[in-house]
Amino acid sequence: MQNADISPAALWDDVEAVRTNSPLVHSITNFVVMNFNANVLLSLGASPVMAHANEEVEDMAGIAQSLVLNIGTLEPDWIMAMKLAMKTANARGIPVVLDPVGAGATPYRSRSIADLLDAGTPSVIRGNASEIMSVAGLSAVTRGVDSSASAAEAVEAAHNLAKSIQGVVCVSGADDHMVDQEGRWMTLSNGHEWMTRITGMGCSATAMIGAFAAVQPDAWRATSSAMAFLGVVGEWAAEQVIRAGGGAGSLQIRILDGLQLLGRDEFLSRLKMILHH
């Protein structure tokens, strides 16, 4: 995969692929973000299904093109559902994207993440710096679901974690870092600080990675494409809202608009991407 095309134009091709193919993304996610995540996927052009009952998750993972696991609002039945779904997804060879929300905040969260990693293999793990450092087994103080570390501080941990899972790790923050088991590393610097005032933006990024991984077999490129598109859309949306005198509530709507309507030229002209060698 080292020679895979990761040009800005190639990342845009992945946006078009999601819009054209409308992949079915099975999300076992948390109560707080469920509605917004589904709307993000719909605006993007994907097809969300938010199913978490133990009785049906294996069947749902059996027909989906990707699986997204988000531990935001934990309880034992949901962890069991995630294990069942991940087992099915791994057996089928479809991508699994894990969001370890609040990793390290409580012993229960840490145990639950360890149980999930023992039960199956995620293709991608996306989290903020503290979450990634916690999952990687490093000491990081997590304040609820907010990061107490910078994304840059977590890059080394991300590289180690990517090798451990033989997959992709995304550290999101003011800058987003995508690394994989082969040592590939991209940094993206789009977005806007107001995006942190909307609950579920990080969780929605994870859901978007699920959609992109469903249509792009290179999980590192898929993760990069998803994060690039969300960052550019967020930046564009914030400019529209500020110009109109709006705030965070308006921004949420504008982001959904941008995910549906933003075009190729706008994306390519705004994208701030660094590929590390």
Image: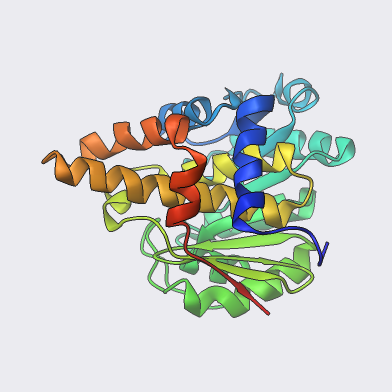
Residue at the image point whose x is 48% and y is 41% from the top: 204
Q: How is the image coloured?
A: rainbow
- Which picture quadrant has residue 87? top right
Name the residue nearer the viewer: 69 or 137. Answer: 69
Q: Position of residue 153 (x, y in %)?
A: 49, 79
Q: Is residue 211 above or below residue 269?
A: above
Q: Is residue 19 above or below residue 186?
A: above
Name the residue nearer the viewer: 188 or 81. Answer: 188
Q: Is residue 139 above or below residue 194?
A: below
Q: Position of residue 248 (x, y in %)?
A: 22, 42
- Which picture quadrant has residue 156? bottom right
Residue at the image point whose x is 56% and y is 26% from the top: 45
125 on left or right of 142: right
Residue at the image point whose x is 73% and y is 37% from the top: 215
Asked whether the viewer can see residue 112, the reply is: no
Asked whether the viewer can see residue 128, the reply is: yes
Q: Position of residue 43 (x, y in %)?
A: 47, 27
Name the residue nearer the viewer: 180 or 9. Answer: 9
User: In what quadrant of the picture does the C terminus appear?
Assistant: bottom right
- Which picture quadrant has residue 80? top right
